[in-house]
Image (cartoon, rainbow, N blue to C red):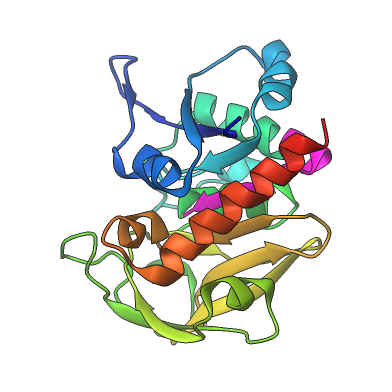
Amino acid sequence: MKPIVGITAEVLEDGSYFMPPVYPNAITQAGGIPLLIPLIPGEDLEAMCEQIDALFVTGGEDIDPAYYDQVPHVDLGKIAPRIDAMEYALIQKILELDKPYIGVCRGLHMLNVATGGTLYQSIHSQREEPVMQHKQQAERTHRSHPIEVEKDSRMYKILKEDKFKVNSYHHQACNEVKSPLKIVARAADGIIEGVESTEHSFVFAFQWHPEEFAQIDDEPSKRLFKSYIDAAKKRKSLE
């Protein structure tokens, strides 16, 4: 049986769900079955986590700073309280079950918040250090700025690249990162670009969007999603 990967979606103002096809396409390409996770009652979240074999938290709105004990900064963008609550609970349960996790952009931020970390609500107004452009004005497969991955990381073992350019669509970023997460990739201006868990079988999160590159046959990105699905298969076999 192929593993089932739950993917979070954005909720539009009219209550409909929005998911760019690149997310499920990356899962299908790697050999998994994508499943959109709608807004579901809190009492059903545990059952949802028991049913899926892996979780993929995608990009989206800013995160309510109340989750990391801060008040809204003047440059905080639109938040999605119902999605915040669901994703926060989903991630904590998935970590408890030690099921594979990938988060991109907001999915990195929410993983960091769910494990006790904090965010820059706006990197352009809250960081003292100079910041390069992190919300590129180009197509989503364009590689706009360089990053560096630590060679002693599990992320490097999968990607097999330590210096390369990535796409970039964000104005928030991780600030404090706490155990079990470990910072393993940064941009040239110091912005955190990748983390991994030191206590879980497969937990990785990225500031960039590797799913976009996987769809244009970028081998490191395809290898990432293949490793993710393989980890989901292994976890599924334990049940």
Is residue 106 shown to the viewer in this render?
yes
Answer whether residue 172 is magenta in the image: no
Is residue 131 shown to the viewer in this render?
no
Residue found 42% across the figure and 31% down from its top: 9
Q: Looking at the image, is 201 positioned above or below residue 190?
A: above
The residue segment tinted magenta is: 92-104
Counting from the top left corner in percent of width and height, residue 87 is at: 59, 34
Residue found 58% across the figure and 47% down from its top: 229
- Residue found at the very far left of the displayed protein: 138
Counting from the top left corner in percent of width and height, residue 121 is at: 49, 56
Q: Nearer the viewer, residue 98 or 171?
A: 98
Q: Looking at the image, is 81 positioned above or below residue 75?
A: above
Q: Nearer the viewer, residue 10 or 63?
A: 10
Q: Nearer the viewer, residue 123 or 231?
A: 231
Residue found 64% across the figure and 28% down from its top: 52
* Quadrant of the image containing the C terminus: top right
Counting from the top left corner in percent of width and height, residue 226 is at: 52, 55
* Quadrant of the image containing the N terminus: top right
Q: Looking at the image, is 163 positioned above or below residue 224?
A: below
Q: In the picture provided, is 98 more to the left or to the right than 68?
A: right
